Amino acid sequence: MLNNAVIKPLLLYMAVAVLAVMITLLSRTFAQEVPLVIHLDEAKWTPPGGGNGFPVGVRTMTLGVDSESGGVTYYALFPAESHFDLHWHTHNEYVAVLSGSVNLVLGPESHSLSAGSYIVIPGGVNHAWDVPEDSDVVILVRRSGPADFHFVSEN
């Protein structure tokens, strides 16, 4: 049988653990996003970057980061005639083409995409982007977890 010297600390520990879980659940329930309105034509793009597998000249604008998953939402502008090498991410990626056109290799299939196209790229699936020579492409990207890039050798 357990005596009071063991039961009281155990009950106190359990009460604190239950309280911690309740606070966590309540904070998630009542956490609110901050209102945000951004117009694409007013985007404050990063300076052109890229190389080492990334499209040369790529520009981005971060819109937000999910406080729970670490997933980022951002605009990306890939210049005409740019290429994003074959790669994959740990987490799912959700993409909407906002302007221009782009060719996407997604797993074993190729897709020609234009403004209004929506793509779901599951984590672990190889993909690559090629922008035609006629115009830049702008995409809206949301990730279900922190961004990571694992480039794949295209032998």
Image (cartoon, grey):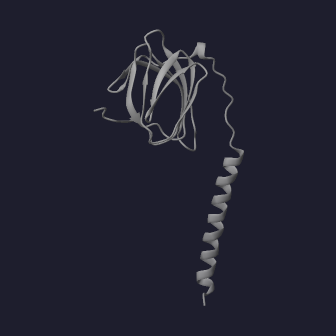
With 79 as the anchor, is 23 left or right in this view?
Answer: right
Viewer-nearest residue: 118 or 40: 118
Residue visible at 37% across and 22% down in the picture: 50
Total marks in image: 0
Indicate the position of residue 30 as horizontal and vertical percent values: 72, 45
Determine the residue located farthest toward the front in the rendered image.
109
Please name whichever residue, 137 or 126, is drawn nearer the observer in this view of the structure. Answer: 126
Q: Quadrant of residue 139?
A: top right
Residue at the left extreme, as displayed: 155
Snapshot quadrant of residue 57: top left
Q: Quadrant of the C terminus?
A: top left
Image x and y of residue 132, in percent: 44, 14
Measured along the vertical axis of the image, is residue 17 above or below residue 44?
below
Residue at position x 57%, y 41% from top?
67
The N terminus lies in quadrant: bottom right
Percent across and percent down for residue 88 are: 42, 37
| 51 displayed left or right of 129 | left
User: In front here: 79 or 38?
Assistant: 79
x then y, percent, for residue 55:
39, 21
Residue drawn at (51%, 41%) of the image: 145
Does 146 sit above or below residue 64?
below
